[in-house]
Image (spheres, helix red, strand yellow):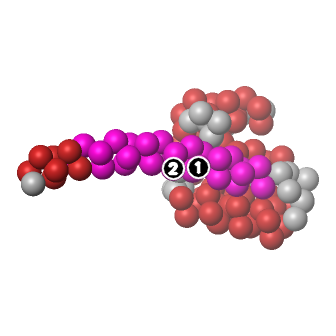
Amino acid sequence: MSDFVGEFGKITDLVSGAAKGVMNKFDHILFNALVGCLKSNDYEAVQVAVDQLVKENRPVSIPPLYFVSKAHPIERIREKARTGLSAFKQDAKIAELTEGKEIKAAVEALIKEFGNYRE
């Protein structure tokens, strides 16, 4: 019986590792889809995406949210992105990294600090 338990444990570890790999890939795809929703002109779609990004609390969300907060053509959506950005409690760091920079350079600085969602 102990051989079975030991072997079953090994199998479980292998399956668990594979499942984590699949779930990580799935998480990555869903995260990319959320970030993609930030491009929308539909306020409700952006609202759901921002709320979910905030809920996941991944700092990698900061660069795309910052970009939307500065460059989206609809003010209401920019405001929602600013609200979402504030939820990360990184306002001082974001201001420090982006001060006096054009949007592209600011986003690049944020990516260096907080990561890139495409990775």
Quadrant of the drawing holding the N terminus: bottom left
Q: Where does label 1 land, which residue?
A: 26
Residue 79 coordinates in the image, percent (x, y): 76, 62
- Is label 2 in a helix, a strand or a loop? helix
Nearest the camera: 5 or 117?
Answer: 5
Q: Position of residue 116 (x, y in %)?
A: 61, 36
Residue receiving disc 2: 23
Q: Is residue 8 rendered to the left or right of residue 81?
A: left
Front one among 10 and 57: 10
Query: Picture quarter containing residue 49?
Result: bottom right
Instruction: State which region is magenta.
Output: 9-37
Residue pictured at 47% horizontal, 42% vertical:
21
Q: Amino acid at mark 1?
A: Phe
Residue sitting at 70 percent across and 34 percent down? Answer: 106
> Label 2 amino acid?
Met
Image quadrant for the C terminus?
Answer: top right
Q: Residue at x 72, y 51 (%)?
A: 33
- Please say whether residue 30 is one of the residues in the magenta stretch: yes
Question: Measured from the top left, where is residue 48 in percent x and y?
Answer: 71, 67
Q: Is residue 13 magenta?
A: yes
Q: Residues within 10 Å of mark 2 (few under 14, many from 20)?
A: few
